[in-house]
Image: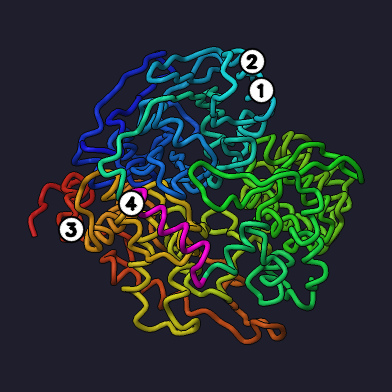
Amino acid sequence: MKGGFAGKMLFVDLTKGSLKDEELSESIARNYIGGPALGARVLYNMMKPGVDPLGPDNVVGFITGALSGSGAFFSGRYTVVCKSPVTGGFNDGNSGGHFGPELKKAGYDAVFIRGVAKKPVYLWINDGKAEIRSAAKLWGMDVIEAEAALKQELGEPNLRSSLIGPAGEALSLMSCPVTDGHRVPARGGAGAVMGSKKFKGVVVRGTGKVPVADQARLNDVNKRITTALREGPNKPLMDVFKERGSGSFTADHVVAGQGPVKNWGGVGVIDFSEEKANRIAPATLDKYKVRKYFCANCPVGCGADYKVEGGRWPLGDTTRPEYETQGVFGFLCLNDNGEAVMKCNEICNRAGLDTISTGATVAWVIECYENGLLTSKDLDGIEAKWGNAEAIVALTEKIARAEGCGKTLALGSAAAAKKWGKGAEYLQVVRGIEPAMQDPKFAPMLARDYQCDPTPSRHVKGALLANTKLPRYVYTDTGDIDLWCTAYQELNNDAGLCLFIKFTGVPLTTQCDFIEATTGWTFDEKEQLEVGTRSIMMRQAFNVREGLKPADFVLPPRLVGEPPQNEGPLKGVQVDHKLLKRNFFKAIDWDLETGKPSLKSLKSFGMDDVAKDLYGETTKH
């Protein structure tokens, strides 16, 4: 390979205590690029269908992208993959920070972990040398404490890590690893998979240089992005984003109906005002701002470090909550106490919890409590009322410690409802996963994403882009543009690029420019669509082999206006999610009943082994 890749993957068996390097072939690298696509390809090969997600045969992978470590702007992402203990299907979580590029600089494109250790361990990778080390002293520490202890133990202040906290150790199905103390590849319970393996995480230091085929061209693409940020038509948007991050428009989202309120059952302008929304947003909370935070190779720096020394919850050094976190602990719970939102954010970051699922589970608890299905006795004395900041923080703490009612709630809202035998009518989940804080009634293509993506309820897929390319409430002939936008975002994730590069105003083909400059391959718009589509097909094939069908992924009625709201900005809106689904399945050539990619399409994408698995011995077409 000319550039971009280390050309090597590490396979670790914790049961055997073994480590093995394997070559990453150019054909696999070119067809799957990295991230969730490479992860799905490797897990499909390594795992038999039907394995216990919390058993030794599940595999968890930490995967870079083709652009990781290259210096390409916005290339700070990495992906964690596994079989989800929530959905029973493929799971991927995507995170920023500095871990991904560091892993590539340490000589590995990906690391895959299987088996179960006898005692807690972590993986230490130092410039191509890997070893399994005891994590006995780290077990029970939160992720920030653990990383600090590791820096001291290893004598390496510049290491990077992806670690679980107490939530993952307790097998919370909402748990996840954390990098840089607050950047999180969340959703789907990857933290519980790591905890079940007694695996604290991956710690890495890399000082190597990632080869770049055409450095001058890569520099030129970076300059184009810099020019767009300084002079382009999206400059006003990006200037705000630079200052206030993903929560820049929290109040606008609530007022417009983009942000769901009151466990998806309310109306923003009526149940949660613009004034209240601003109290939980950077417009107010940035009084605690100390400095900006930049992920690796980012020219924007949308994060921020805070210092909170007074008030009800003096946190000391902490970080600004992102939009999704503001939403779930704020307007989804009708909570306008910004300090409480920051406290919940800190609890989740330290414990290693997905804030979206955790906050949404709290919102579900509140609605159950308000309607008499749960009592304060069920909740260890907590009065779980709408907007009760103390109760919201207390429930989050219970979940983080898996203590009392939190032991059940740590499994997520759907599992808690099943265990307690009540509250199912108020669940807002797809295949057990609580959806993100982007309302499909405002952006209808999200309905297709939340329901049909192999990893459901995600907002970092292609729907947000598709909604900018189509009239909002037109449901006919959406399949091709939906597929293109989905493929674009798939490739973003596979290459290690941040979602927000598309907001800079540079052409969407900048993906191709970066990949060509870094790898030396020819990579045009045709390949952009092909590789992105292969990525989602590989993830779907994993689910089909597990026996999952489209009928297993059901949208909650509130998300799509069934029945429509009778007041507010989304009054009368009912999303034709069934037609959006049919359009997409037709465009990508999947069967509506089984979810299978067609035999013809599998063969055309070079997935002959998958075709054999899904269709038997006969693979001719």
- Residue carrying label 2: 152
Please tell me whether residue 221 belongs to the stretch shown in magenta.
yes
Q: Which of the pair 138/497 is nearer the observer?
A: 497
- Residue carrying label 4: 514
Q: Which circle's residue, 2 or 4, is located before the other in the chain?
A: 2
- Of badges 3 and 4, the one in the foreground is 4
Vertically, is 400 above or below 256? above
Q: Which circle's residue, 4 or 1, is located before the other in the chain?
A: 1
Q: Residue at x 33, y 60 (%)?
A: 595
SS under mark 1: helix
- Residue carrying label 1: 148
Dot 1: within a 10 Å radius of its alpha carbon, few (fewer than 14), some, or many (20 or more) residues? Answer: few
Vertically, is 137 above or below 452? above
Q: Which of the pair 324/421 is nearer the observer?
A: 324
- Residue carrying label 3: 599
Vertically, is 469 above or below 389? below
Q: Which of the pair 443/465 is nearer the observer?
A: 465
Q: Residue furthest right?
A: 311
Alpha carbon separation for disc pair 2 and 1? 6 Å
